[in-house]
Image (tube, rainbow, N blue to C red):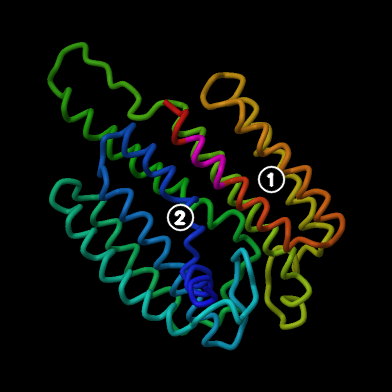
């Protein structure tokens, strides 16, 4: 059982809740990529995390931005083997996408190359995590959604080209975009919580993060800013019928608990709680967003 838990922690399987539910919504709404889009996005995210974990640990530092930061819970050899397998799988999916969705395939293959190029030989503390709560959600959710939306809109424009009076309808409904933004905000909260939890250790070894640069007080302000935006958007979507009312209810309860844990300086529990709350919300979004 302990080996299975170490493998799950190393591969960061829980991160798939920031990928699969949203790409299912994109593929269903835009009809671009289908299952390959879902698999490709998930594999690419796990690949980045595997490479990130392996090279961070090879440099003698603790894993970053994970539910747990206990070094003993991670297997560096498993992370490196996973990175190799995931790279091969991502390339296969990218080549398959080239056939029917050329630009999605190109972007996926370029992303795989960039993951390896940008992390090779770079010391973890030089990577600069002070803006991770912005860059990670943008790279994982907002950027890919924008790409899928633009490509689908381009496809629709070509389909109606030459038809007099044709109007190009939105490629995706507002619910899909709002749900993705909600996921991005939830990821930002998760990242800041991780940085707050790790602030004492990061400060001790000179790692630059939002928490070490702004201090604990400044990072806490950022945390409550992101949580407030998340709750406002969740409530707005619930009121307008974009998703179930259980979404703002779950996030509201989780936010209160996170606030208490943060005030008590036990962010480790807050990280796990918020991740679990978001996982449940992501499942509900898939089931209720039309």
Q: Residue at x 65, y 76 (%)?
A: 70
Of labels 2 and 1, the one closer to you: 2
Q: Secondary structure at mark 1?
A: helix
Q: Which mark is residue 16?
A: 2
In the rendered image, residue 205 lying in the magenta stretch gets the answer no
C-alpha separation, residue under disc 2 versus residue under disc 1:
21 Å
In the image shown, does 145 or 49 lie closer to the viewer?
49
Which residue is at a point 45% across and 32% down the rendered structure image?
287
The front one of 19 and 147 is 19
Name, please, the residue furthest toward the top.
165
Could you say which is closer to the camera, residue 280 or residue 191?
280
**First in sequence: mark 2 or mark 1?**
2
Q: In this figure, which residue is indicated by the disc labeled 1?
A: 226
Q: Position of residue 85 (x, y in %)?
A: 30, 73
Q: Position of residue 4 (x, y in %)?
A: 48, 72
On screen, residue 19 versus residue 271, left or right, reads left
Mark 2: few/some/many CA within 10 Å (<14, 14-19, 20+): some
Magenta span: 279-285
Q: Quadrant of residue 154?
A: top left
Residue plotted at (77% across, 47% down): 257
Q: Residue at x 17, y 30 (%)?
A: 158
């Amino acid at each position: 059982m302990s080996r299975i838990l170490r493998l799950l922690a190393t591969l960061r399987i829980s991160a798939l809740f920031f990928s699969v539910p949203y790409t299912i919504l994109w593929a269903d709404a835009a009809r671009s990529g289908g299952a390959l889009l879902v698999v490709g996005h998930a594999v690419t995210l796990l690949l980045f995390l595997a490479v990130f974990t392996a090279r961070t640990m090879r440099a003698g530092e603790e894993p970053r931005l994970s539910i747990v930061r206990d070094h003993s819970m991670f297997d560096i050899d498993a992370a490196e083997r996973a990175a190799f397998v995931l790279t091969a799988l991502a390339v296969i999916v990218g080549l398959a996408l080239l056939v029917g969705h050329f630009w999605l395939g190109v972007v996926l293959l370029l992303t795989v190359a960039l993951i390896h190029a940008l992390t090779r030989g770079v010391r973890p503390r030089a990577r600069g995590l002070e803006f991770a709560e912005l860059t990670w959600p943008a790279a994982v959710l907002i950027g890919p959604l924008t790409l899928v939306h633009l490509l689908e809109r381009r496809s629709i424009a070509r389909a109606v080209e030459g038809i007099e009076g044709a109007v190009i309808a939105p490629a995706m409904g507002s619910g899909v975009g709002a749900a993705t933004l909600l996921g991005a905000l939830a990821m930002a909260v998760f990242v800041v919580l991780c940085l707050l939890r790790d602030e004492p250790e990061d400060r001790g070894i000179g790692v630059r993060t939002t928490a070490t640069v702004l201090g604990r007080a400044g990072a806490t302000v950022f945390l409550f800013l992101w949580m407030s935006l998340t709750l406002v958007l969740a409530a707005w979507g619930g009121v307008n019928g974009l998703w179930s009312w259980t979404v703002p209810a779950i996030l509201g309860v989780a936010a209160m608990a996170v606030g208490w844990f943060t005030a008590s300086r036990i962010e480790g529990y807050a990280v796990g709680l918020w991740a679990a709350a978001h996982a449940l919300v992501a499942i509900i979004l898939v089931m209720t967003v039309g």
